[in-house]
Image (cartoon, rainbow, N blue to C red):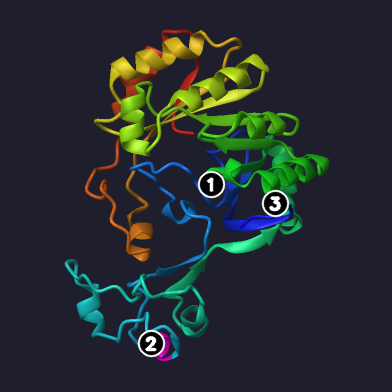
Amino acid sequence: MAIKDQTLISNVQRYSVNDGPGIRTNVFIMGCPLRCAWCHNPENIHASVDVYWKRTLCKQCGLCFSVCPKDAILPPVPVDEAMEDDSTYHKIDRAKCDKCMKCVEVCPYSALSKVGDTVSVKEVLDEVERDAPFYANSGGGMTVTGGEPTTQPEYLLELLEKGKERGLHICLDTSGYSSWDVLEKTMKYVDMYLYDLKHMDTEEHKRMTGVGNELVLENLRKLSEANQTIRIRVPVVPDFNDSLKNMREMAEFLVKLPNPVQGVDLLPFHNWCQDKYRWLDLDWSLRDLESMDPSELEDQKELIESYGLQCTIGG
């Protein structure tokens, strides 16, 4: 559970160029109320530590098996057997594992690794500031993402406030599925909202994310009324929200907002996160869906631009 000055962070990703202007450092806060079918960061869904098992690195040495106090590690098998494409072998019995990390500590091959660390606001900002020269030259800064950062409101507000005190340009990457009370408080510190729009039909939205879109649209209107700088990000998934009908409804909604959004980024679906699901022993319903080529979204881009909105394919 987060307290004001520390929470679970899965990664502080330096030198990012796709999550806001310039060169940025992304801070991934763990925990999310949505269950997006295409989620590319499954390690951030739950606000709890976890363990990756990377079978391509595992030598089946048995050290983890020998130290596990919960019998949550399966006995070693031949490496070739574990590596077979149709293998159902997974090193960790997740139902028994209590995340003590003894297996991680003894693994000499980094096949087992901890996901998530409790990190203070100061520790995060010290890491972010290591790239301050790049921010100055590129107009970059810190992007707070997740998961959904607003699920840890006290920590988030502390991070934003202290980051602004250090002179950072701050982007908040959000699904918009948050209480307005939290979002409103972030406005003092956020320079740009990277705001997800997933589908304009609430039932379709619920089918693929677990929640309707009413709160998302309401919060977007409120941020616009407050004249915040907003960039819309659309994770485009085939046979879900890629239709011209959905894009037209989205554009019509955006042009009716009280103040213009800065632009719209169409983010083509990719399946590069497959390994993360394997490492966590999670099934992924979109595993076999091919990544989209950016050229597939030219018609959608042209339609959105016809409404006078600036649009890009990619971040």
Image depth: mark 3 or mark 1 in front = 1
Question: How much space separates mark 1 and mark 2, taking CA atoms?
Answer: 32 Å
Q: What element carries label 2?
A: helix
**Magenta-span inclusion, residue 305:** no
The magenta-colored residue range is 62-66
User: Residue at the bottom extreme?
Assistant: 66
Q: Which quarter of the figure is the N terminus placed in?
A: bottom right
Q: Residue 65 carries which label?
A: 2
298 relative position to 311: left or right: left
Q: Which mark is residue 128?
A: 3
Image position, residue 181 (x, y; %): 66, 31
Image position, residue 127 (x, y; %): 70, 56
202 relative position to 191: left or right: left
Residue 211 visible here: yes
Kindly indicate whether the residue at mark 2 contacts the one at mark 1 (C-beta within 8 angstroms). Answer: no
Q: What element carries label 1?
A: loop
* Residue on which the image places disc 1: 146
Q: Which of 94 and 159 is in front in this view?
A: 94
Pointer 3 or 1: first along the chain:
3
Q: Crowding near pointer 2: few (<14 within 10 Å), some, many (20+)?
A: many
Pointer 1 or 2: first along the chain:
2
The kind of residue tagged 2 is Phe
Dominant SS in magenta: helix
Task: Check the image and report above or below for 52 versus 305.
Answer: below
Pointer 2 or 3: first along the chain:
2
Task: Check the image and report above or below for 31 versus 278.
Answer: above
Q: Nearer the viewer, residue 274 or 42?
A: 42
